[in-house]
Amino acid sequence: MSELRHLINITDLSVEEIAHLIDVADDIIEHPEAYQDICAHKKLATLFFEPSTRTRLSFTAAMMELGGNVLGFDQAASSSTAKGESVSDTIIMASCYADIIAMRHPKEGAPFVAAKHSSVPVINAGDGGHFHPTQTLTDLMTIHRKRGELGNLTIGLCGDLKFGRTVHSLIEAMIRYDNVRFIMISPEELDLPSYNKETLDAKGIEWKEVRSLEEAMPELDVLYMTRVQKERFFNEEDYIRLKDSFILRRNMLETAKEDMIVMHPLPRVNEISLDVDEDPRAAYFFQALMGKYIRMALILFMLGIR
Ligand code: NCD
C-alpha cells in the first residue's frame, strides 16, 4: 500500500477492509508473539486535545505491543495550542516526528483539516460530537466475536444520540451490512441528528424511535448504551435534567433475549448500574479489550505493514 491513507470517517474503510482488520485482530489474539516486533523503530503520535482514557491508552498499548514507540500529549494545555498554535501547524510538525498520528479534538472536522496537512496517516480518535471511527472498529469487532456476524441484528441505541459521536459512526458502519434495523431510545432533546436520520431513510433502513428502554428491550440483539455528553451542553441545567434519563438496571434485562449483548463505549456515569456487570450479557469491558487488538490491526494497515 503506497498511497497515504487517513481514517477520518468509518466509511473511509470498505466493508472488505474492515473484515480484513477483524481477521488480523483475531490473529493477533491467537499469536501475539508474531507481532511483538513488527513495528520496531516506528513511532505513533497521540495528539489528544480532549480527555480520554481508553482510546489513548489502547492506542498506546497497541503500539507498544507491536514493538513501536509512542509520543504525544494528553491535553491541549500541555501543547503549543495553549500558545495559539493552529491545528495545521501542530500536524505539520508532528508528522516530522512520527510515522502515524492518532488525534482527538473537540472541534468537528479538525482531524479532516489535519489530514490535509499531514505527510503521515492521520487517525481520527474522536472529533467533537461528530465521529469516532476507531470506537466503531472496536464495536464491530466486539459484535463479530460475540455474535459471529455483523448482519441480521436489531440494535438499540440508547442515551445521548444527539452528541454521541460513537453512535453516529456506528450507524454509518452498520448500514452497510444486511438486515440491520435500529431502535433509537433517547429523550426527545437528545434525538439522533437529522443528517443521520436522512442517511437511514435514503438507504431504506428500518428504524424507529421509542421513549422507554422497556419497550425496546425484548426486540434487541445489541443494546448500545451511551453517556449523556456533558461537555457538549451549552448550559448545566439541561445536562442535570437529562443526565439520568435512561439507567439500565439488571432486573430490566429479564425481558431481554438470552443472547443479547450490552455494549457501552465507556466511560459510564450512571447509565448502567453496577449489578449489570455480573450479567453474562454485559460486554463493555470485553469491548474495551477488543479496542487494543483492533487498533493494533489498524496501525499495521495504515502503515502498510503486512
Ligand atoms: C467515547 C468518546 O470519547 O466519544 N469514549 C471512548 O472513546 N471510549 C464515549 C464517551 O466519552 O462518552
Image (cartoon, rainbow, N blue to C red):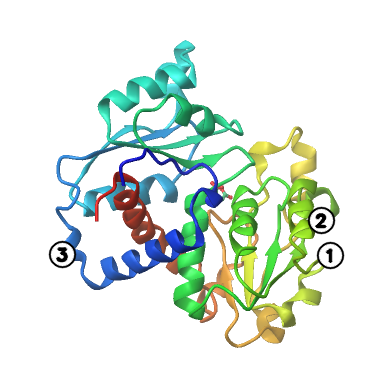
On residue 187, the disc is 2
Residue 97, relative to residue 145: is it above or below? above
Mark 1 or mark 3: which is in front?
A: 3
- Marks 2 and 1 in Cβ contact (< 8 Å): yes
On residue 33, the disc is 3
- Ligand 1 under 8 Å from disc 2 Cβ: no
Residue type at the position of mark 2: Pro
Position of residue 135 measured from the top left corner of the image (x, y, whole percent): 50, 54
The crowding category of the residue bearing disc 2, from other C-alpha atoms within 10 Å (few below 14, some 14 to 19, many at least 20), is many
Mark 2 or mark 3: which is in front?
A: 3
Kind of element beneath mark 2? loop
Position of residue 57 measured from the top left corner of the image (x, y, whole percent): 36, 48
Kind of element beneath mark 3? helix
On residue 51, the disc is none
Q: Earlier in the sequence, mark 2 or mark 3?
A: 3
CA gap between label 2 and label 3 equals 47 Å
Residue type at the position of mark 1: Arg
Res. 285 visible in picture: no
Q: Is residue 116 left or right of residue 45?
A: right
- The number of discs equals 3
Q: Locate residue 71: give its quadrant.
A: top left
Q: Which residue is mark 1?
A: 211
Q: Residue at x 43, y 69 (%)?
A: 286
Q: Residue at x 65, y 51 (%)?
A: 168
